[in-house]
Amino acid sequence: MKIRDIRVNVTCPGRNFITLKITTDDGVYGLGDATLNGRELAVVSYLQDHVAPCLIGRDAHQIEDIWQYLYRGAYWRRGPVTMTAIAAVDMALWDIKAKVAGLPLYQLLGGRCREGVMVYGHANGGTVDETLGEMEKYMGLGYKAIRLQTGVPGMKSTYGVSKDKMYYEPADADLPTENVWSTEKYLDSVPKLFEKARAKFGFDHHLLHDVHHRLTPIEAARLGKSLEPYRLFWLEDAVVADNPESFRLIRQHTTTPLAVGEVFNSIHDCRQLMQEQLIDYIRCTIVHAGGISHMRRIASLADLYNIRTGSHGATDLSPVSMAAALHFDLSIPNFGIQEYMRHTAETDAVFPHTYSFKDGYLHPGEGPGLGVDLDEALAEKYPYKRAYLPVNRLQDGTLYNW
Ligand code: EZ4
Ligand code: CO
């Protein structure tokens, strides 16, 4: 079954998505997400100019060989652009294989290990009370796990607090929006949010929080310690993980579970954090970490150290990624939780899919393959629109992590 055609679809139904479509000489096609938020066209070129010419005529069934060919064959290893491009090919080939087998993808990955995929939703608001009102809505929708983010008094904007209550979209401008950050103000506000949430709603729901890489290790240690009474499911991206040893310091001070990895693209980014048991959840995601084939390796390594998965699943990961994540999440023993940020109706219409939400769990559906399609005629109506993530500056103007 030879690869006959490779196309890269670019569409912007409210936000940009890049989708790879691989078609075989039998007429079977598979889809792969290739969206890298704010740097989309770099992956488009990588796929069109450098990957597609090498794949035409290859056997679509040889998923592992093609993965190795693209990874080793480039000579230049790793990196978000390369690993996103490889991920898109890998996802599309798994989709093809499962379609040919006539099975939902999770069956080819070893079958289901659980009934459904527990997801967390995103309650946020400008004030603590507004955030708790949103939390109540998520509880009403059946969510078992909810991430809480709230505005910081004295700061105009912060990560995770949206203008639109239904959807959160940080890549909001033609040039990067400039935000101002104060660690001091932030550190005062977070424990108050969780104290009030537990006092009001008790301990029946899992609660999560995303620091979005904004603390130093000792600040993160202090935050983790101050949140211990509220028993978080996890504290996410407490510090930048470029230096994995930062987590050693946090670990020495707090039992609040730690999650990291949404910007990782390789098992080598995870290795030391796992082997030294410095984290509890690994947030790598199929689209940015080399596809299903590479994520299986990451999850297997994590399992050796009692680390569970909690894959990134924000709106910049397309429904193709979400479907791939659900098949993967069902099939691995050490799944923890899956992030789930709703897409808009426009996005859902461009990517018709079989996955569905019920009582806090997502289910991939039982059709063959990933269970997602691309409506190309509709996609064409939404041309690419340049959009950047914001940047962050300290109050004195120093550029900081967003
Ligand atoms: O900022 O996906 O946990 N989720 C996140 C996301 C990221 C965006 C960046 O593209 O941190 O909201
Ligand atoms: Co995050």
Image (cartoon, rainbow, N blue to C red):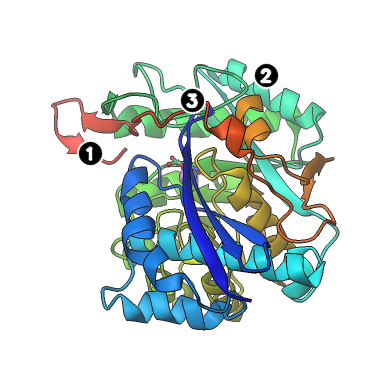
**Quadrant assignment for the N terminus:** bottom right
For residue 176, above or below residue 367 = above
Name the residue carrying label 2.
133
Residue 304 position, x and y percent, is: 59, 81
Residue 292 position, x and y percent, is: 58, 67
Q: Residues within 10 Å of mark 2 (few under 14, many from 20)?
A: some
Mark nearer the viewer, 3 or 2: 3
For residue 277, above or below residue 119 = below
| The quarter of the displayed image where residue 369 is located | bottom right
Q: Amino acid at mark 3?
A: Val
Please, what secondary structure does the residue beneath circle 2 have?
A: helix
**Quadrant assignment for the C terminus:** top left
Please, what secondary structure does the residue beneath circle 3 have?
A: loop
Q: Amino acid at mark 1?
A: Tyr
Upstream in the sequence, badge 2 or badge 1?
Answer: 2
Residues 32 and 401: in front is 32
Name the residue carrying label 1.
400
Evaluate whether residue 184 shows in this view.
yes
Q: Residue at x 54, y 60 (%)?
A: 286
Evaluate whether residue 233 shows in this view.
no
Residues 284 and 108: in front is 108
Q: Residues within 10 Å of mark 1 (few under 14, many from 20)?
A: some
Q: Amino acid at mark 2?
A: Gly
| The quarter of the displayed image where residue 106 is located | bottom right
The CA span between labels 1 and 3 is: 18 Å
